[in-house]
Amino acid sequence: MFDLTGKKALITGSTQGIGFAIAKCLAQNGANVFVHGSKNMEKCKNAAAKIKGSKPVIGDLSQDGCAQKLYEQTGNVDILILNASVQYRKPWNEITGEEFDEQMRVNLKSSLELIQIYEPYMLNQDWGRIVTIGSVQQYKPHKEMAIYAASKAALMSIVTNLAKQLAPYGITVNNIAPGVIATPRNDSALADAEYRKLILGGIPAGNEGKAEDCAGAALLLCSDEGRYITGTDIIVDGGMHL
């Protein structure tokens, strides 16, 4: 079960955290993985060195033309996981136009462009897996991440829209919505004992998750065992959204 032998997978934002855990999990189950970084090729190479058989690719998703540049590095893939995102923490009425644009560009527009460029091959072979990484904030937006939450909610709308259109061609489109996960992005916030207590108090499971908790969900959605799952959202949050 969950055999991905022979499948090629691109996981954006996979030099660390959730993206890295997913890339490692897929590779362990037979996939040929592309580890993606935004700007630092050395960091990308170091991450890829920890995943047997993987290859590093680089591309800044905040820049026009990045999807094409990534495609030129990877060629066609069977599995596309859209994990890379930008997040600004500040009150909604202090968000600048530039910060709004960057979050929407990376989190939403680039995701659509990547799907547009990688989907034709999946269509032609009647098999494909597209997984977006959303957030529990689709359901429970943080007061200081209004635009980030909005971008993830919009991404889920694209998932449900495309899932219906692509299902007849053997392509599934799904979302994974992580809650509070112990990743480098959250290290500084969770290091504050008072804030950590407040956040964990709102999670029924009583603790933060690990990046690997999201990898298992991705493996299911990317495998043949997940062929009948499409247009759905797997929430990995210890019950935080409830």
Image: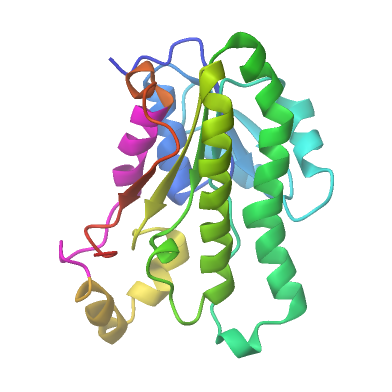
Count of numbered badges drawn on the protein: 0
Judging depth in this view, the residue of 92 and 65 nearest the camera is 92
Please determine whether, in this image, residue 5 is positioned above or below residue 91. above
Relative side of 175 to 1, left or right: right
Please determine whether, in this image, residue 56 is positioned above or below residue 140. above
Please determine whether, in this image, residue 21 is positioned above or below residue 143. above
For the magenta stretch, what is the residue range?
A: 203-221
Here the colouring is: rainbow
Q: Whole-percent x and y of residue 37?
A: 64, 45
Indicate the quadrant containing the C terminus: top left, top right, bottom left or bottom right.
bottom left
Asked if residue 208 shows in the view, the reply is yes
Please determine whether, in this image, residue 48 is positioned above or below residue 241. above
Asked if residue 48 shows in the view, the reply is no
Seen at 51% across and 59% down, the residue is 153
Q: Whole-percent x and y of residue 56?
A: 63, 33
Seen at 56% across and 83% down, the residue is 90
Judging depth in this view, the residue of 124 and 98 nearest the camera is 124
Judging depth in this view, the residue of 8 and 51 nearest the camera is 8
Seen at 22% across and 74% down, the residue is 202
- Whether 45 is among the magenta residues is no
Relative side of 136 to 185, left or right: left
| Quadrant housing residue 99 | bottom right
Indicate the quadrant containing the N terminus: top left, top right, bottom left or bottom right.
top left
| Quadrant housing residue 126 | top right
Q: Whole-percent x and y of residue 223?
A: 39, 21
- Whether 206 is among the magenta residues is yes
Q: Whole-percent x and y of residue 231?
A: 45, 38
Seen at 71% across and 52% down, the residue is 109
